[in-house]
Image (tube, helix red, strand yellow):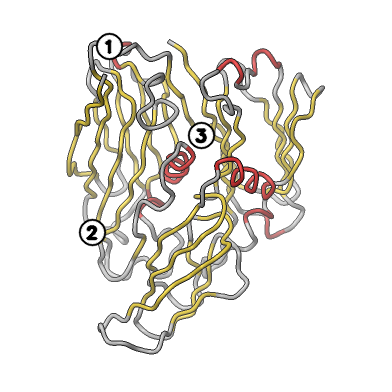
């Protein structure tokens, strides 16, 4: 058995604001796909807007079989977070926006539980057609022309390769704009075993793109019940879940930023909560100068307010919780035993209740519920 790395496309044009559709091969055991997108930005177009990283513009990534069967369907941000939770690093790109610099986004699409999973993957021979569909919501105001994208596929090869037992179907199942003091009552679909549920919680932002409230104060109560509310298995806050993920996965969420933002504007960090920040000024004239850049003291939010009085930018390392504002409710503590994962059909019914805080600033945020489920062949 060996792993073959093979490019489906290199430097493939991807129209601004468009969807790129590429057919995958008709056969083979596909374990993962690495996506690398890139494009130079319009000079200074990202200095005073919320979406300043390339990953922010990857609005949908889908793997569709036989024209309609969803295998993957979620945003670039969510896939970056899932790459991390599957064992990858948290800061694959240098996020910067000075001038017309080239912006990049790397992430994995794993059909198994991780990169190089020998048990689960996508058996392409079982479908008449499988497509990867990449959509971005960029515009000419931010990007002067088409993006370029590399699509690198990882295949398990060899005479001793065993057919995969199944694949992970991962999709954005619910999305809504938050309303203060609102409770959503969600019944989890019963047809497939659930490996994980992912909650992405984004706060609203002000006119200067600063978060109106900490993201952990948007969703203040998470409850889960089994057997039609007979058994309560969860009742805590989003912040509690973030810390659970930190102690469970045991790895640090971090962001590598080089922002060039308008003074007093918020920098979207890619972290749900910022615990520590370190940086250094980068004089554009290459001469040593008194640093003229600072971040707001005491701000542990998902955005950081910048103070800047010259044309310099800065390099920053931020450490925190909840990469891309995502938290995981996981059921795969025993990853090799899918029988121990959540079986909604056996539990009839699994109820997930999510409450938005009774605070006007908690309104106008976004909550996504992503389901990661096992499809057996």
Q: Is residue 359 left or right of residue 192?
A: right
Asked where in the image residue 315 lies, by quadrant, the reply is: bottom left
Q: CA distance from mark 3 to mark 1?
A: 35 Å
Q: Which residue is mark 1?
A: 160
Frontmost of labels 3 and 1 is 1
Q: Are marks 3 and 1 in contact (CB under 8 Å)?
A: no
Vertical placement of 322 versus 184: above or below? below
Q: Quadrant of the N terminus?
A: top left
Q: CA distance from mark 2 to mark 1?
A: 49 Å
Label 1 Cα neighbours within 10 Å, binned few <14 / some 14-19 / many ≥20: few
Q: Earlier in the sequence, mark 3 or mark 1?
A: 1
The mark found on residue 172 in the picture is: 3
Residue at the limit of the structure toward the bottom, as seen here: 290
Residue 176 or 187: which is nearer the viewer? 187
Q: Which residue is mark 2?
A: 144
Q: Is residue 202 left or right of residue 294?
A: right
């Amino acid at each position: 058995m060996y792993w073959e790395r093979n490019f489906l496309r290199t430097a493939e044009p991807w129209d601004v604001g468009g969807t790129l559709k590429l057919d995958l091969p008709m056969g083979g055991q596909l374990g993962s796909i690495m996506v690398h997108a890139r494009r130079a930005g319009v000079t200074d177009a990202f200095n005073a807007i919320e979406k300043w990283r390339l990953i922010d513009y990857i609005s949908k990534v889908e793997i569709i079989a036989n024209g309609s069967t969803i295998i993957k369907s979620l945003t670039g941000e969510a896939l970056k977070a899932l790459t991390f939770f599957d064992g990858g690093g948290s800061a694959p790109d240098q996020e910067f926006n000075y001038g017309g610099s080239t912006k990049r986004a790397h992430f994995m699409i794993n059909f198994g539980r991780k990169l190089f999973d020998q048990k689960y993957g996508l058996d392409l021979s079982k479908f008449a057609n499988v497509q990867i569909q990449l959509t971005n919501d960029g515009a000419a105001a931010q990007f002067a022309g088409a993006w370029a994208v590399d699509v690198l596929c990882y295949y398990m090869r060899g005479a001793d390769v065993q057919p995969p037992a199944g694949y992970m179907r991962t999709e954005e199942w619910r999305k809504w704009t938050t309303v203060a003091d609102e409770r959503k009552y969600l019944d989890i679909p019963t047809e497939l075993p659930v490996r994980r549920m992912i909650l992405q919680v984004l706060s609203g932002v002000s006119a200067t793109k600063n978060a109106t409230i900490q993201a952990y104060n948007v969703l203040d109560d998470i409850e889960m019940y089994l057997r039609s509310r007979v058994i309560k298995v969860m009742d805590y806050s989003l912040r509690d879940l973030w810390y659970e993920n930190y102690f469970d996965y045991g790895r640090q969420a971090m962001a590598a930023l080089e922002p060039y933002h308008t003074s007093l504007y918020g920098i979207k960090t890619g972290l749900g909560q910022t615990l520590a920040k370190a940086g250094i000024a980068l004089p554009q004239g290459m001469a040593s100068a008194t640093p003229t850049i600072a971040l707001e003291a005491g701000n542990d939010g998902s955005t950081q307010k910048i103070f800047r009085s010259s044309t310099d930018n800065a390099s920053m390392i931020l450490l925190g919780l909840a990469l891309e504002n995502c938290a995981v409710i996981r059921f795969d503590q025993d990853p090799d035993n899918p029988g121990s994962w959540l079986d909604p059909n056996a539990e009839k019914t699994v109820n997930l209740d999510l409450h938005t805080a009774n605070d006007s600033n908690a309104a106008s945020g976004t909550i996504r519920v992503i389901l990661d489920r096992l499809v057996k062949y």
